[in-house]
Amino acid sequence: MEVSWALLANAVIAGLLLGGFYAAMSVGISISFGMLDVVNIAHPAFIILGSYIAYIVNDRFGFDPIVVSVAVSPLFFLLGMVLYRIYYICFERRGQESLRGLAFFFGILFITEVALVLIFGVDYRMVSTRYGDVTWRLGPVDFPMRLVVPFLVAMVMVIGVQLFLTHTFFGRAVLAVAQDQLALRLMGVNPVRVKERAFALSIATAGVAGAFLIVIQPVQPAIGREFIGLVFAVCVLGGMGSIWGTLLGAFVLGLAESFTSTFFGPSWAPAVSFGLLLATLAFRPSGLLGR
Amino acid sequence: MPGNNVRTTLRRALGAVFIGLALTGTALAQQPLKIGFGMSLTGPLAGNGKAALIAMEIWRDDVNAKGGILGRKVEFVYYDDQTSPATVPSIYTKLLDVDKVDLVVSGYGTNVIAPAMPIMMQRNLTFMTLFGLNVNSKFNYDRYFQIMPAGPNPAIGWSQGFFDAAMGMNPKPKTVALVGADAEYPAMALEGAREHAKKTGLKIVYDKTYPPNTVDYSPIVRAIQATNPEVVFVASYPPDSAGMVRAANEVGLKTRMFGGGLVGPQFAALKTQLGPLLNGVVNYEFYVPDVGSRFPFLEQFLAKYQARAVVEKVDPLGFYLPPYAYAMMQVLDQAITGTKGLDQAKLAEYIHKNTFDTYVGKVAFAKNGEWAAPRVMMTQYHGITGNDVEQFKKPGRLTVLSPKEYKTGDLKAPYHENKK
Amino acid sequence: MSNKVFAVVALAVALALAAVTQLIPNDYFFTAAYTVLLFVILATAWNILGGYTGYVNFGSAAFFAIGAYTTVFFYNAFKAPLPVGIVAGTLVAGLAGLGLGYLTLRLRGVFFAIASLALAVVLYIFIVNWDYVGGARGAYVLQPREIPFGLPRYIHLIYAVQLVMAAFALVVARAIEHSTLGRGLAAIRDDELAAECSGVPTLKLKIFSTMVSCALMGMAGTTFPYYLSYIEPSSAFSLSYAVNSIAMPLIGGMMSWMGPLIGAVLLGSVQQLVQVTVSSAWNLLIVGVLLVLFVTLAPNGIMGWVDAWRRRRGR
């Protein structure tokens, strides 16, 4: 197989576009796991939930799924707040979050998936968008809108979250809570409130990422599980608690998968991603940009 | 008056006799014929499993309306196997030992057929199976039967039509790219495709698989394009079938022939989702409205099925499993009636020896339990406009390329110039 | 009761059960019981690392599959009989656990959990690409024609083997629980930093605990290919094994060897019942809901209730 510049360029573009999407899926984990130390294994379940909500509205009324998900994100925010409350009362307060908290979220993941199966069945669902089948061609390089539009919105969302964290009072409170809860309390801020809202934000991002997912590919309830590892891989690779790190990690993973798919064979792509994760854990657990 | 007494007594006696006869009659007819099976009602193949169940229930209702089999009403006892092999031994041992069914058939797919085989073999049961891939090649069981029309060598029979059509192009192609999902069916289909490539002298320039949860298929299609194949054979499951067809359109894949073994476009969901993107793609189908006239009762059956399918939210077209699920039960029906009983050995012998008239035509079985001759239809999509499902219920959207007896037209190549 | 005595009693009970249940005339009992016993082993194994040491392993399915596929490998390569497969599968799974532990146990427990999930994915891909053990197409393992001990059907043998293995797993778990090793693990679970400062060799103990836990999970998987005659990657790596191996000890109680046993028997039996009565999507829902309910409301599981009840009665 001749390695042409076109092939290389397309692999890079596809990897970056995919990476943007992965970043959107993982930014929530970067907050909940990286900054709040809450191992929300159920994060992909909320992504899928977001996909289905986008699907329902798109199917019934024809609205664009991404627009729908943004409109619906306050609901996800609320859901996140409730979830965190339960988590806090049952686990964090008692100091049992590592084991039981994990098990709790695992249970949530399962319940969400099964509930979706019971309601929607296991058939794949897709949305129809005006740009879904459009591809811009710049010479030999293709830019499928199906990937480009989610990428652009994802970038807005991820960069938006980063700016929020660094430039608003609340955002900085979140960063502070990640570093030193006691100090935060001494400064008159209720860390539990801060964590609750931050967690809610992470769930809200999951809901929006769900719309990206269903624009890019068909969705069925069980595929959430396939993304657990990927989402955590992105965060660990990039460095916990750093949004730029998540972005970087997502791009690295996206490119690694794209290159492996194109040049070595697609069946090894996930292995590469997780191999990267295992290697990072073994040799540089703080990740590329971690503290 | 004495006459009246005699008449009343006679009437009473006759009444008693009639009631007695009726009671015995119903007592005899009360013993239902219980047929047991597991079926995928949840899990990855649930869409097909539920469709097959509807077809089987329609068969059961049809048969019972005519008085049952050998005078006995047919009853189903079934459990959800969740498309998981692990549930199968428990389900079938319960059916046989606890529910005491008279006959068993399989669920849908190799995953649930293979684990049931040891149980069937231990008890010497005749086992009619629904779309398993070459399961019997390992067990060599003489009472195994398969209703999928892939022929005695399923891997080869599956893509026979595709490669026949490919080599019918002028000039003959020289290169082929093979691609498929990392899963059981695609692995088998690709194996068969490799055989065909060897036989026809095609040079394999790409031969790779992708993991089933791949998100983006464009890098794969680009890599394929980079090898400039004249023929591209794809073996995929519904989500990746959709992904590959979309990617082929996105990348603007240029090749002479594209498709072959995509599972998914046979169902309404993918036909409507992809719509015009399917134009030009060559793929296998098991039933096409364009040859509907060759299968007389099938259209009536499909009407009944389609009515139920809409209500129960399964594939509204029903061209894939349902006709064959129905046919499978018809074979059993005729075998039981023909042998006048449920002797498993006699049933197996009868099924091996005879040809059956079913809704999908004449069915005969080879020694290994597969169909005696393959009858996978290879078709090419064309003229699809928009995304509604009604256009697929009528002829005009598919050309049947193979086998010869059902052919309705010729292959239009190259793929990228015939996407209308 | 000392470990040796317990071991003898456990083995005796297992054999007695195996003998007595032969009288049951239908095979359904054996197929259902086999599955429940499989979960007894998995839950007990998981708990050695989870309940005793405090480290969550999400990759139970990976080690279960290692056991299963090692059996397949030895069957394909040497036509090896079942006992060889069992020993080999257990050893290979233990080695894999050793590897995973060595790579990740220096970090926080959470990383171990994620790494175990990642390992499951990598292993799955590896198996899918390895044609010798069937790859994506699956592998067939044919049950032998002659069945030893004069048992009528192969399922009876497999079931008996599973009983013995379950007894073995319980013996191992109990032995660890009541040993110095067990106390060290408990110290790690309660406060790893304090344990390290008190001189507990935390890394060594954790690695050992991981190894044993993963070896037993592999052992649970070794008979699986024989049970089904067919094994393919997506069902061997089914996440239901991961969820159940966490839910069952959680529900039964994670502090002692009895908890996973109770949890597995209860939850496993319920699942088997649900499978042949109502629709099975509810099966998984039940597991998920029970998991969440127990983990929030009854963190010490059923054994915890029993202990609390005992204490209230003033023992």
Image (tube, coloured by chain):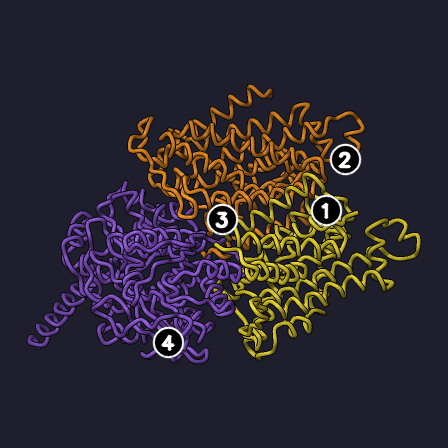
Chain colours: A yellow, B purple, C orange
Judge from the rendering whether residue B38 lies leftward or rightward of residue A247; answer left or right: left
Q: Position of residue C104 (x, y in %)?
A: 67, 37
Q: Position of residue A288 (x, y in %)?
A: 73, 48
Judge from the rendering whether residue A228 lies leftward or rightward of residue C109; answer left or right: left
- Please, what secondary structure does the residue beneath circle 3 have? helix
- Disc 1, disc 2: CB below 8 Å? no
Q: Chain ID for label 3?
A: C
- Disc 2, disc 4: CB below 8 Å? no
- Please, what secondary structure does the residue beneath circle 1 have? loop
Q: Nearer the viewer, mark 1 or mark 2?
A: 1
Judge from the rendering whether residue B266 lies leftward or rightward of residue A261; answer left or right: left
Q: Chain ID for label 2?
A: C
Q: Chain ID for label 1?
A: A
Question: Which residue is under mark 2?
Answer: C191
- Please, what secondary structure does the residue beneath circle 4 have? loop
Question: Which residue is under mark 4?
Answer: B382
Q: Is residue B49 visible?
A: no
Tags 4 and 3 both on a single chain: no
Q: Chain ID for label 4?
A: B
- Is residue B283 depicted above or below A102 in this figure? below
The amino acid type of the residue labelled 3 equals Gln
The amino acid type of the residue labelled 2 equals Asp
Q: Nearer the viewer, residue C239 or C115?
A: C115
- Is residue C125 depicted above or below B234 in this figure? above
